[in-house]
Amino acid sequence: MTMEESGEVLLDKANGLAVITLSRPNKRNALSPTMRASLGECLADVGKDEAVKVLLLRGDGPAFCAGADIVDAPQSPLAWRERIRMAQAHHIAIVRMNKPVIAAVQGAATGGGASLALAADILVMADDAKLSFPFVRLGLVPDGGASALLQAKTNAATALDLLLTGGSITAVDAQHLGLTRRVVPAEQLDAASRALASDLLNLPWEALMLTKALCAQHWAAGLEPVLAHEAEAFALASSTAGHQSALAAMLLKLNQKGKS
């Protein structure tokens, strides 16, 4: 058994299972640049480790991941493009990884956090989980592949409705849409996701790897070009007056909340 700690991202490997835990619960696991870099290092480690057969993604505390930490928001379109590319690289690594990836989602999975969950092969959701896509409310476009992932894993109409309104999907909604077959009471999420991982570990890994690759030939075949466009669109949106106004309003609200 090995345990590696990289900032606020933990990697635990034992008996063929790797568990990556976002561990910044006081910030709802919002991803700072250093956390993003640490996550990338953990994913690279898991990807090249032939002893690992299954990966479980999880978050400490009441939320899975609140997306990017806007306190550390980039100050230029080019800087935003680089951060988006980093997130995209992580999600592509999950999609292309030659082992099944499970995401255990509780509470909020917002923005890039929702995209991270959608990149996984199998979602296990607590009954209090919610995937939220507030990008347009911030004057931005979806990031982390959200538009491609939602359309591939639900349908174009559902994706357009959610992304154009800044909407959310509850665990029950996700089950009805076919995003997950597995909704459990919040207190059972960890046990249920680990039980699923154990079930997968008892199956022939070669068959799992080949099946994942086969499915990806259909739904993820054109993912990289879409993400390249996404990074450019996000950089452009970050420079607009609409985004600047929405960001200022959000920061003001956060400051007022912190003082109350």
Image (cartoon, rainbow, N blue to C red):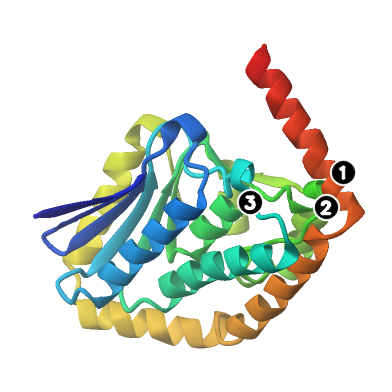
Query: With respect to residue 203, does 125 lie above or below?
Result: above
Mark number for residue 9? none
The extreme front residue here reads 75
Q: For label 2, count other residues whose C-alpha is less than 10 Å away and answer few (under 14), some (14-19) or many (20+).
A: some
The nearer-to-camera label among 3 and 2 is: 2
| Whether residue 144 can be seen here | no
In the rendered structure, which amino acid carries the disc numbered 1?
A: Ser
Work out whether mark 3 precedes mark 2 in sequence or the reverse, and give the earlier one: 3
Given residues 88 and 109, the one toward you in this image is 88
Secondary structure, mark 3, is loop
Pinpoint residue 239: horizontal percent, then vertical percent: 83, 60
Classify residue 146 as left or right of residue 184. right
| Whether residue 219 can be seen here | yes
Query: Can you say which quadrant of the picture contains the N terminus?
Result: bottom left
- The residue at 23%/83% (across/down) is 206
Residue on which disc 2 sits: 139
Mark number for residue 111? 3
The nearer-to-camera label among 2 and 1 is: 1
Classify residue 125 as left or right of residue 220. left
User: Tags 3 and 2 in contact by the CB under 8 Å rule?
Assistant: no
Work out whether mark 2 precedes mark 1 in sequence or the reverse, and give the earlier one: 2
**Toward which corner of the image does residue 170 lie, by quadrant?**
top right
Q: For label 3, count other residues whose C-alpha is less than 10 Å away and answer few (under 14), some (14-19) or many (20+).
A: many
Given residues 198 and 224, the one toward you in this image is 224
User: Tags 2 and 1 in contact by the CB under 8 Å rule?
Assistant: yes
Given residues 149 and 124, the one toward you in this image is 149
**Toward which corner of the image does residue 225 lie, by quadrant?**
bottom right
Residue on which disc 1 sits: 245
Cα distance, mark 1 to mark 3?
19 Å
